Amino acid sequence: MMHIALPIAFTLASSQIFTLGFRVNNNYSAPAPTSTSRDALSTGPVSSSSLSILPAQRQCCTHDMKMMKDSDAQTTTIHRYDSPFFPNDSSMSSALIILNTPIHNTSPSVGDDAPPQCKQHGTLSGVIGALWKKSTYRVCADGGANRLYEATVLPSNQRVSVDDDNEDADDSTSEDYLPDLITGDLDSLHPHVYQYYKSKGVEIVRVEDQDFHDLDKSLMAIEKWIGQKKVRDNDETNAGFIHQSRVFIYGGFGGRFDQEMAVINALCVWGKKETFRQTTLAVYDEQTCAFLLSALPTTNHIRIKYPGNGLEKTIQSSREGEGPTCGLIPILGRCEKVFTTGLQWNLNGDVPIEFGGLVSSSNRVIDDVVVIDTSSPMLFTAEMIVAGV
């Protein structure tokens, strides 16, 4: 288990712009922005949510943003976050990392307070269930294997804390939830869990290096997987193939704050690596998702599953997805200029975004596509919703 501190903020050269693997489409055009009519600043003691841009200000902000883009010698590209929860989601290759946090794997109708006999035996549902189905390569980061074992191997009426070394657990359940790899320093992996997955043929790799978190070690494995897949895909398509993939990190929120910050720092560090230039790195749990926005000259286009009132229209036929409540967090320090369209309270670039000043929280997505231009990388967060059954 990692015990050293890693820095959260660092300086990026213009040649090291975050490229998180949003699909590039220079000809893509977003829908016309929706006007807003509320000004709100989260500055110091003011408790409002975010900064509004009035319709009359849009032409000015568009002109200012054009000047910012024109001043940069690099060609503007578009990075897109397309929700993986759409029914017609693309076949883009995806990897899942499960961290060592409890898996809340039941939908609202079968919640944690339901009697044991009402819970599904060994079945992942909710956000984790959807991400598992979307993934083609799955990694447990050390004690994450304990959490997966507890959620999918133990029957609901026998589930106990994985902190208890329960060697009498019922292992005769479905094998639909076997990870491809368990890795880390393995100091948290319980012996009976190790033996169970080893008996099922799961690859288990111990990495002793204490300069890296178990999440880093999992991302190392995924980096290798992406590289191997690039070689295979390039062999099949001869040349000129741009590999696109996604990495879902599940369990990054809700635990110790220092561990949450380590997860966000991993987004910052690994998002810069060449291997991940065409890869979306996003963190999820059952309540929240988060990913980094690229800085100019890259424009960010975001499509979530439930913008505005979309939830009300689809609640009878859909399940999990990102909800409209969102935030823009200057996790890497002061951001001089941020311009947005598609939010209820848009930003027009006239106030820096920074801790101790303006932070756009409790904002709301109201358009199908949110467009964000930012002078520095920022964290975009959205609530997660499980709707219908």
Image (spheres, rainbow, N blue to C red):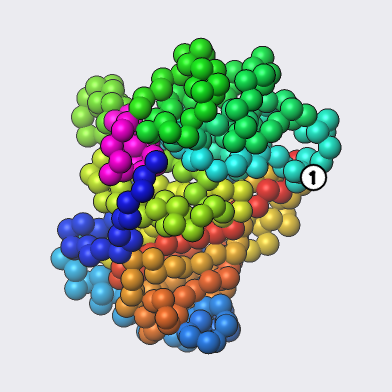
Tell me if 16 is positioned left or right of 195 in this view.
Answer: left
Q: Nearer the viewer, residue 243 or 275?
A: 275
Q: Is residue 208 magenta?
A: yes
Tell me if 388 is positioned left or right of 375 in this view.
Answer: right
Where residue 16 appears, as percent x and y from the top left, is 21, 57
Prevalent SS, magenta region: helix
Tell me if 306 is positioned left or right of 313 in this view.
Answer: left
* Position above or below: 224 against 273: above
- Circle 1 crowding by C-alpha within 10 Å: few under 14, some 14–19, many from 20: few
Tell me if 189 is positioned left or right of 124 in this view.
Answer: left
Residue wearing tag 1? 113
Q: Nearer the viewer, residue 77 or 163?
A: 163
Residue 285 at least partly seen: yes
**Amino acid type assigned to the residue bearing label 1 in the image:** Asp
Where residue 384 appears, as percent x and y from the top left, is 61, 53
Where residue 371 appears, as percent x and y from the top left, is 43, 64
- Callout 1: SS: loop
Where residue 283 appears, as percent x and y from the top left, is 47, 49
Residue, x 54% and y 52% (percent of image)? 255
Q: Is residue 374 magenta?
A: no
Residue, x 52% and y 78% (percent of image)? 50
Q: Quadrant of the C terminus?
A: top right
The quarter of the displayed image where residue 334 is located:
bottom left
Residue, x 23% and y 44% (percent of image)? 274
Residue 20 at least partly seen: no
Residue, x 30% and y 41% (percent of image)? 210
Q: Quadrant of the N terminus?
A: top left
| Numbered range of the magenta stretch | 207-225
Q: Nearer the viewer, residue 245 or 1?
A: 1
